[in-house]
């Protein structure tokens, strides 16, 4: 009995742009702002450790 060919996993795309601002960084995904320094309702990334943790958590959703 033959088994149907398995489909390759669908690729996910994550496109980020990181911009430096006076007090931290802005992380954009396409047109959405993911983090903006000194904004109360957004994530604040004022050091590499915070930014690294945030990006690692975001990338977990894209790992196969």
Image (tube, helix red, strand yellow):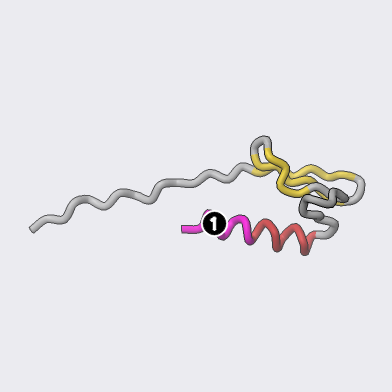
Farthest front residue in view: 41
Establish if 20 lies above or below 55: above
In which quarter of the view is residue 55 placed? bottom right
Residue occupying the point 91% across, 46% down: 22
Farthest top residue in view: 31
Q: Would residue 46 be found to the left or right of residue 52 on screen? A: right
Disc tally is: 1
Q: Would residue 5 be found to the left or right of residue 26 on screen? A: left
Q: Which residues are magenta?
A: 57-64
Is 9 or 32 nearer to us in this picture?
A: 32
The image shows residue 43 at horizontal and vertical percentages of 77, 54
The image shows residue 3 at horizontal and vertical percentages of 16, 55
Farthest right residue in view: 22
The image shows residue 15 at horizontal and vertical percentages of 61, 42
The residue wearing badge 1 is 61
Q: Would residue 55 be found to the left or right of residue 35 on screen? A: left
Q: Secondary structure at mark 1?
A: loop
In which quarter of the view is residue 50 placed? bottom right
Quarter of the N terminus within the rendering: bottom left
Residue occupying the point 84% across, 52% down: 40
Residue occupying the point 63% across, 61% down: 57
The image shows residue 53 at horizontal and vertical percentages of 70, 63
Classed neighbour count for the residue bearing mark 1: other residues with Cα under 10 Å, few (<14), some (14–19), many (≥20): few
Does the magenta portion include 18? no
Farthest left residue in view: 1
Residue occupying the point 79% across, 60% down: 48
């Amino acid at each position: 009995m033959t088994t149907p060919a398995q489909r390759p996993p669908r690729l996910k795309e994550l496109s980020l742009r990181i911009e430096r601002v006076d007090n931290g960084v802005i992380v954009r995904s396409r047109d959405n702002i993911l983090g903006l320094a000194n904004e109360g309702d957004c994530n604040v990334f004022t050091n590499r450790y915070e930014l690294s943790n945030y990006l690692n958590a975001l990338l977990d959703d894209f790992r196969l």
